[in-house]
Image (spheres, helix red, strand yellow):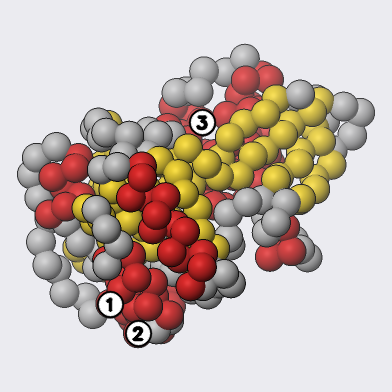
Amino acid sequence: MIVEPAPAKLNLALHVRARRDDGYHELETLFVFVRDGDTVRLTPGTRDGFAIVGPFAAGLSGEGDNLVTRARDAFRGAFGAGQPLSIVLDKHLPVASGIGGGSADAAATLRGMAQIAGIAPDERELMAIAAALGSDVPACLAGRTMIGRGRGERLTPVEIPALPVLLVNPGVAVSTAAVFAAWDRTDRGPLPQGNALAIALGGRNDLEPPARALAPAIDTVLAMLGDARGVRLARMSGSGATCFALFDRAEDCAAAAQAVRMARPDWWCLETALA
């Protein structure tokens, strides 16, 4: 059995520069990953199988075109069928939440299949498959802090400290397409210069205003995180609705998590750290 982690992805900054003729958007973003997320288990066997378990499995039930199976089929199209595989996705990240759960799952599937087939994880064709599956999948395949440009697939590695981080989702699924459609098409400039932390602190998320208009619960999350003791940065990730707070001290992160859980036990709350 191959067990591949599929950690949550955060956009510490996300600058939308333009809408492209191909329907995508020209982006500049700072991708980071945390220590926790989903898990993909791949077991060679006599026939293919795919199952979803875990706390958020129901959010994907009945979905006929999961990114995991699309990644499996795309890998086989490029590298050959190989052995049948039983794949189990253990879903711990909320669905449609701006933290790249589906993209991370697809990337983990590609990494696991590459390991079984003896293919290097940085193989160019593997990255091409990732880019075809989705804009965030190449960064999730790399699995480290990156600046992404273009659709997000042109990647430059950077370093960031392993800061404590709190992720909070108010239980609202937000449509990425709807958020991008509501973007006001104003270019507010590139990512700032400096190290990754300086980029995060000096950057912004251009999708936050349209997401907040579509899902006002995001306002409540950001207000609560912004008021936490010791918070360095509170911002929405991706197209929402998950928001994050960065801290210098694990004690402050833990206190903020406890406050959120007490005030809103119905919200999803993950106390973790940047990887």
User: Residue shown at 66%/19% (left/top)?
Assistant: 117
Which one is nearer the viewer's eye here, 110 or 161? 161
Q: What is the x, y in percent for residue 170?
A: 50, 72
The quarter holding residue 243 reads: bottom left
User: Residue shown at 74%/31% (left/top)?
Assistant: 42
Whole-angstrom CA distance, mark 3 to mark 2, is: 38 Å
Say which amino acid is labelled 3.
Leu
Say which amino acid is labelled 1.
Pro
Q: Is residue 172 visible?
A: yes
Task: Please give the residue where the numbered disc 1 appears in the rendered image.
Answer: 209
Q: Is the N terminus in the top left, top right, bottom left or bottom right quadrant?
A: top right
- Binning the other alpha carbons within 10 Å of mark 2 as few (below 14), some (14 to 19) or many (20 upward) gives few
96 left or right, relative to 51: left
Say which amino acid is labelled 2.
Ala
Q: What is the x, y in percent for residue 94?
A: 58, 60
Q: Secondary structure at mark 2?
A: helix
Q: Secondary structure at mark 1?
A: helix
Whole-angstrom CA distance, mark 3 to mark 1, is: 35 Å
Task: Please give the residue where the numbered disc 3 appears in the rendered image.
Answer: 126
User: Residue shown at 44%/57% (left/top)?
Assistant: 257
Question: Outermost residue, right direction?
Answer: 46
User: Residue shown at 25%/43% (left/top)?
Assistant: 248
